[in-house]
Image: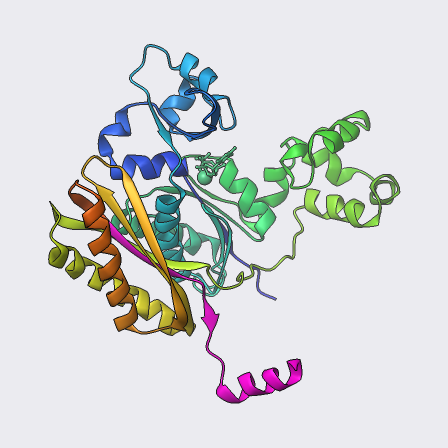
Amino acid sequence: MQNRVVMLVDFDYFFAQCEELRNPTLKDKPVVVGVYSGRTEESGAVSTSNYLARKYGVKSGMPLFLAKRKLDGTDAVFLPVDHEYYDLISDKIMQILSGYATTLEQVSVDEAYLDVTEQVEGSFEKAKGYAAKIKTDVKNKVGISFTVGVGPNKLTSKIACDSQKPDGLTIITPDEVECFLAPLPVDRLLGVGRKISARMDSLGIKTIGDLSKFDPQRLVALFGKTLGIYFHNAANGIDNEPVQEAGEAESIGRIGTLKQNTRDLDFILQKTDELTDDILKELAEKNLSFKQVAIYAVMTDLSSKSRSITLEQSAKDQETIRRNVKQLFQKFLNESQLEIRRVGVKVSGFSKEEPRQKQLTSFFQST
Ligand code: TTP
Ligand code: CA
């Protein structure tokens, strides 16, 4: 059997990079994106930060007041999380990535595995150029950079990806897997948390290499059959988990920048019509109907707002999206004074079209 070529794509400092994308003046400043708990002005935690802020010791999960203290005296910018916006950017990138792979498995808002075995004909040499091409394409189309790890399975590509960030590209061929993994600390393996790594440490297992040489029967005796076998295989770079398409996307959205800032409804609708057509293409490909339509607007002061509407019945046509987008923007313009800079359209609440006959049968079965 031909070996697999699996890629892990992990977007760099994602939330913070999205913020830099909509406001490029942030690029040379430390940027911290956080969740504000609202109790006091300073209470909350850091979601992520750009690499400049990380140089000052800012880390994900850190209390915001601590991050503020570390960045004292710099021109650091603190922003609240804007999931709607990050989701739109993420959707756009995932859509591009899926065109480059036989299967794409999205694991989080900023991470996806791609099985590209066919595309590169099983060659890791070709995979290098292929990964570089995907990076350039996404950079050109969306403006976001990411890191890629390539290996013969998910386990290896994940660890390869983590080994060099940001904007990294690390390739581990099947021959290199053992040497690559051996010197790494054992807690780099998925499933080896603090407790287990402490236990392994007491057994003299510090590196993945140590674990790979440890008697597998003893591992089973110590950790149980499932975990014991998993640890033995993982340490030896063995992982047969396929790259699996997850269920359908929860939403399909597009976002675009207007040629000029405006409050003119017709001008806005020209852009949203373009975005709508793009969404319709994807809906048709996936044979989906939607039940919610949402709009998104980024204002000239870079604040952003979204509005949505739930339909009485699922729909899949252009007219329904256009009509609701128009209504939502009409209402929105009445409520806001600012000019709009970027606009987005999103549909969600999907159902798959079923043949009428099948619908009837399931109706009778359930009564
Ligand atoms: P990560 O991929 O862990 O981090 P990152 O993309 O910010 O940085 P990099 O990959 O370059 O190291 O997480 C992805 C996003 O998830 C991140 O941008 C923000 C969010 N996140 C949190 O909200 N809280 C957290 O504790 C972590 C780790 C991430
Ligand atoms: Ca990331």
Q: Is residue 284 visible?
A: yes
Q: Residue furthest bottom?
A: 357
- Is residue 4 one of those drawn in magenta? no
Q: Nearer the viewer, residue 188 or 250?
A: 250
Residue 339, image quadrant = top left
Tell me where residue 68 appears, x and y as whole percent.
41, 16
Reply above or below: 233 against 254.
above
User: Where the N terminus falls, by quadrant?
Assistant: bottom right
How many numbered marks, from 0 up? 0
- Per the rendered image, the range of residues in magenta is 343-367
| Residue at 72% in and 28% down | 206
| Residue at 83% in and 49% down | 225
User: Where the C terminus falls, by quadrant?
Assistant: bottom right
Tell me where residue 259 appears, x and y as whole percent.
12, 50
Q: Determine the quadrant in which ligand 2 lies.
A: top left
Q: Nearer the viewer, residue 359 or 180?
A: 359
Q: Nearer the viewer, residue 338 or 233?
A: 338
Q: Is residue 166 found left or right of 263 in the rendered image?
A: right
Reply above or below: 287 against 97.
below
Residue 200, image quadrant = top right
Reply above or below: 292 against 61.
below
